[in-house]
Amino acid sequence: MRHIRCAPPAGPRIIPGCLFQHARRTGPDTVGDHARTERRPHTISLYAQLVRYGFRKHATYLAGALAGAFTNSVFGILRAYILIALWQARPGLAGYDVADAITFCFITQALIAPMQLFGGGLTIPERIRSGDIALDLVRPAPLQLWSLAEDLGRAAFLLLARGLPPMLLGAVLFGIVTPTGVTRWAGFLAGLLLAVLTSFGWRYLVALSVCWLVDDRGVSVVSMVLTTFFSGMMLPLTIFPGWLGELARALPWAAMVQAPADLYLGKAPLLDTLALQAFWAATLIGLGAAATRAIRYKVVIQGG
């Protein structure tokens, strides 16, 4: 049996209250590095299990998800009637007809939960406040990828449990547009995946802000306002005039809702839209990776 000598962890001294913990890694033979090395052959299996775990964890609360689907459906009906009145008064507004507007309404209602448009979905802020983040940083998988795998499972479950019911109800009551052809369906599914990645990247950065700001409530409120206004959840961003519309469609929040909705409706160029989504997903996840490295050296822990 091969024996591995691990250097004793040079753990920082923890002082009660809110403090800054300067964590110094001891080199390649730390416990975390050895764990990652030993587990490397099973990385794909590990992440697959994490996706499954995220799905099953949220499936435990099926009644809550169905209640949320009912709420989304009711508000979808109310929004649909408002949009019908608007498009009857302004036919062809934003390049949509009435059927497109109704479909856009129920698509956005279906995306609220999978994209976590009102924020949250990650337990990182609570774990930072409790100090459990120290354990997360020495797991056999990086904190960011671990969280991403669980979040993909969460999004998959909520898309089925809270996303499909509003769409089905909208199809029954109003009639909605459906993509025609394999290319549009494939483009929409790819855009949906990139939207989830973009949403995760943004929410992960908001969650990590607790390390520096101690309290994430202010950042979360600002994030919710920006996401609600600039994602296209309320109204299509193509309605926004001039430079404001161009800016809104180029921001990362548009990649979460407006982009997949336009791909579903066939209102946006496929490759350009996917490229914009991929850019923001890669950028936000890259910033999250840099922030994760930073908190290894400077972590805020609250409590004893």
Image (cartoon, rainbow, N blue to C red):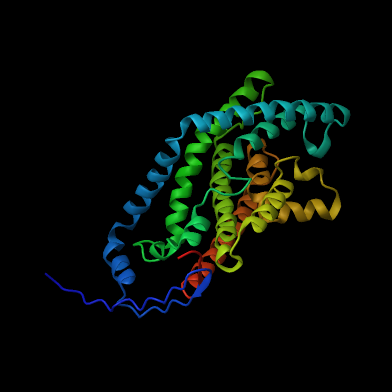
Residue 5 vertical position relative to residue 132 in the rendered view, above or below:
below
Residue 9 vertical position relative to residue 105 in the rendered view, above or below:
below
Question: Which residue is depicted at the point 66% across and 31% down?
Answer: 106
Query: Relative to 124, is 8 on the left or the right?
Result: left
In percent of width and height, residue 197 lies at 54, 52
120 vs 117, nearest the viewer: 120
Q: Residue furthest top?
A: 173
Residue 155 vertical position relative to residue 80 in the rendered view, above or below:
below
279 vs 236, nearest the viewer: 236
46 vs 18, nearest the viewer: 18
Question: Which residue is depicted at the point 33% across and 53% down?
Answer: 46
In percent of width and height, residue 168 lies at 59, 24
Question: Which residue is depicted at the point 64% across and 54% down?
Answer: 220
267 vs 144, nearest the viewer: 144
Q: How many marks?
A: 0
In percent of width and height, residue 291 lies at 54, 68
In percent of width and height, residue 101 lies at 74, 32
Q: Quadrant of residue 60?
A: top left
Quick check: can you spot residue 298? no
Q: Quadrant of the C terminus?
A: bottom left
Query: Relative to 54, is 252 on the left or the right?
Result: right
Quick check: can you spot residue 113? yes
Question: Which residue is depicted at the point 62% across and 23% down?
Answer: 169
Residue 17 vertical position relative to residue 83 in the rendered view, above or below:
below
Q: Quadrant of residue 115?
A: top right
Q: Quadrant of the N terminus?
A: bottom left
